[in-house]
Image (tube, rainbow, N blue to C red):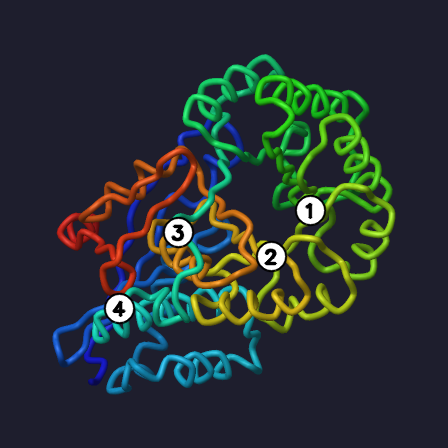
């Protein structure tokens, strides 16, 4: 089998929020790889507020020729061929996002050629259903009362058991603009009140995860995480600091009672190794696309298994291919916690799939069809070109 063609498609999406996440890049970029045996595979290239549709589409076009004529079964060799191509220019971030699009599509092809789901190719199934935690369930919420009402409707009403939010609304402008890492007393208290309102609504057994978005300096991160853990028994405090500060993260980890989760902005197994070796987190959250695809997420998860650390992949604001590909990897590993998903993106995902995926009581059910098990609707994508 040989690769004969590689094409890209973009798809508009709407986060459905009135806050910061609605301002992220409003397009998903998909990669389709065709072969001389009539089998094709779908992948997804990284989507982010920092990466434009044009840049990623041009990047795919620039590297497509190194794949044309190759055997799509040689996934690991092709992964390294592209990864090492950028060794002198920077092989993280844009490179790994680009790489992920090809990698996912190659696994989709291999599954279809083998007549097996990807999770079977990865070693088989540990579980029938994929536990989720719900993000972006709080559209246009600004007060504790707003969050409590949304929690009652969207979390309890849909039988979820876990959610995530960033309650410190004052810090929203700094999602991509770290400055001094401080928050005002008023903004801090508002965040505590929001989480307490959610906790009161959902009850003691519900898991509440907090996203700090890398906003804080060391003393603020320690104080906020400890206060949230003491007042509302949060399940984790995610990305307390900007991702570059390994030594600073160690200081936070050693002085907080709340479990720490990191990994959304780490790339490849090489970036996760010091997290494991230095005992810097109780949970990791690699993003399948940003870190390099199915192949790399599986390797990171296996490394985490050796340290008994649960894996909970980051998704939002990723598209349907990233969501499904992440679920296949999580179905194949023992040390899985929960998979992120955005409540507002379910309908956005499904409008581009030929057959919708199914979420029941906060859990995702994959089918047993070959490859990813789902096909993008190429006719719809073609109309958007």
Q: Which mark is in front, 2 or 4?
A: 4
- Quick check: 23 left or right of 226? left
Residue occupied by mark 4: 116
Distance, label 4 to label 1, CA atoms, is: 39 Å
Horizontally, residue 234 falls left or right of residue 136, namely right
Numbered disc in front, either 2 or 3: 3
Front disc: 3 or 4: 4
Tell me whether the residue at label 3 lies in contact with that at label 4, contact meaning CB atoms closer than 8 angstroms. Answer: no
The first of marks 1 and 3 along the sequence is: 1
For discs 4 and 1, the disc positioned in front in the rendered view:
4
Whether the residues at callouts 2 and 4 have beta carbons within 8 Å, the answer is: no
Q: Residues within 10 Å of mark 4 (few under 14, many from 20)?
A: some
Q: Secondary structure at mark 3?
A: helix
Provide the residue designation for mark 1. 214
Cα–Cα gap, marks 2 and 4: 32 Å
Number of numbered callouts drawn = 4
Q: Which residue corresponds to mark 2?
A: 265
- Residue topped by disc 3: 323
């Amino acid at each position: 089998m040989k690769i004969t063609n590689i094409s890209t498609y973009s798809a508009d999406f709407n986060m459905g929020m009135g806050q910061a996440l609605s301002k992220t890049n409003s397009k998903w970029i998909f990669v389709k790889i065709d072969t001389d045996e009539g089998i094709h595979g779908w992948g997804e290239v990284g989507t982010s507020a920092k990466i434009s549709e044009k840049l990623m589409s041009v990047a795919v076009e620039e590297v497509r020729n190194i794949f044309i004529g190759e055997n799509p079964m040689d996934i690991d060799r092709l992964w390294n061929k592209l990864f090492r191509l950028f060794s002198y220019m920077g092989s993280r971030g844009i490179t790994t996002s680009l790489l992920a699009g090809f990698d996912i599509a190659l696994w989709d092809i291999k599954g279809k050629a083998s007549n097996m789901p990807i999770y079977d190719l990865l070693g088989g199934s540990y579980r029938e259903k994929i536990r989720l935690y719900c993000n972006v369930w709080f559209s246009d919420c600004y007060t504790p009362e707003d969050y409590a009402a949304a929690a009652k409707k969207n979390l309890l009403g849909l039988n979820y058991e876990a959610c995530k939010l960033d309650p410190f609304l004052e810090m929203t402008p700094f999602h991509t603009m770290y400055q001094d890492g401080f928050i005002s007393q008023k903004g801090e208290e508002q965040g505590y009140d929001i989480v307490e309102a959610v906790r009161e609504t959902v009850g003691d057994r519900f898991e509440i995860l907090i996203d700090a978005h890398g906003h804080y300096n060391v003393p603020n991160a320690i104080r906020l995480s400890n206060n949230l853990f003491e007042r509302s028994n949060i399940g984790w405090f995610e990305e307390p600091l900007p991702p570059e500060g390994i030594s600073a993260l160690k200081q936070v980890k050693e002085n907080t009672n709340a479990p720490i989760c990191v990994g959304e902005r780490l790339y490849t197994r090489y970036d996760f190794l010091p997290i494991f070796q230095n005992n810097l987190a109780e949970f990791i959250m690699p993003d399948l696309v940003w870190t390099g695809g199915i192949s790399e997420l599986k390797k990171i998860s296996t490394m985490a298994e050796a340290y008994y650390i649960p894996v909970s992949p980051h998704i939002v604001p990723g598209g349907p291919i990233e969501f499904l590909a992440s679920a296949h990897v999580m179905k194949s590993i023992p040390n899985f916690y929960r998979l992120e998903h955005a409540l507002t993106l379910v309908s956005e995902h499904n409008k581009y799939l030929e057959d919708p995926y199914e979420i029941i009581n906060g859990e995702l059910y994959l089918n047993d069809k070959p490859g990813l098990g789902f096909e993008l609707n190429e006719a719809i994508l073609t109309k958007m070109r």
